[in-house]
Amino acid sequence: MKKIALLAIPAAFALAFTTTAMAADGKAVYTDNCAKCHGEDGKGATKMGTKLGARDYTDATVQASITDDQAFKSIKEGMKKDDKTLMKPSELSDEDIKASVAYLRTFKK
C-alpha cells in the first residue's frame, strides 16, 4: 500500500507541472493569436474586439456560459453570425488550442 502512495505523489506533481506548463504555453499562444481582439487581459476591450462584440472572459458568468469543448470548436472552426465572420477558423494545432483555452480560463475572477 505504501508503494502505491509513494507512486501517487510524483504522479500528482507531474500532473501539476503539466497543467502549469500548458497554461504557460497557452499564454504565448493566446498572446500571439487571440489578444489582438480579446485583449491581453481577456476583456475584449480592444478596437477589433469592441467592433466584433468579443466577450469579457474575466466575467465568471461569461466563463460559465461556455464549455471547453465549445471554446475549442469556436477557435478551430471560427464563428459567424448571419453572414458576418466574427472569428476566422484557426490554423493552430489541437494542442495549442487546448492550451489557449486553459489559459483563457485563468482570466475568470
Image (cartoon, rainbow, N blue to C red):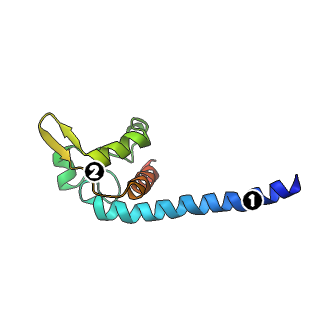
Please provide percent x and percent y for residue 28. Answer: 38, 66
Write the residue at 36% across / 62% down.
29
- The foreground one among 78 and 102 is 78
Residue type at mark 1?
Ile
Q: Position of residue 42 (x, y in %)?
A: 34, 53
C-alpha distance separating marks 1 and 2: 40 Å
Q: How many residues crowd mark 1 within 10 Å: few (<14), some (14–19), many (20+)?
A: few
Secondary structure of the residue carrying tag 1 is helix
Q: Tell me if residue 68 comes above or below residue 18 in the rendering.
A: above
Q: Which residue is mark 2?
A: 44
For the point 32% across and 58% down, the residue is 92
Residue type, numbered disc 2:
Gly
Near mark 2 (Cα within 10 A), the count class, few <14, some 14-19 or many ≥20, is many
Instruction: Give SS at disc 2.
Output: loop
Tell me: 93 left or right of 80. Answer: right
- Report which quarter residue 55 is drawn in: top left
Q: For the view shown, which residue lies furthest in the right direction?
A: 1
Q: Position of residue 66 (x, y in %)?
A: 39, 38
Nearest to the observer: residue 25 or residue 62: 25
Q: Which mark is residue 9?
A: 1
Q: From where the camera sits, is residue 60 visible?
A: no
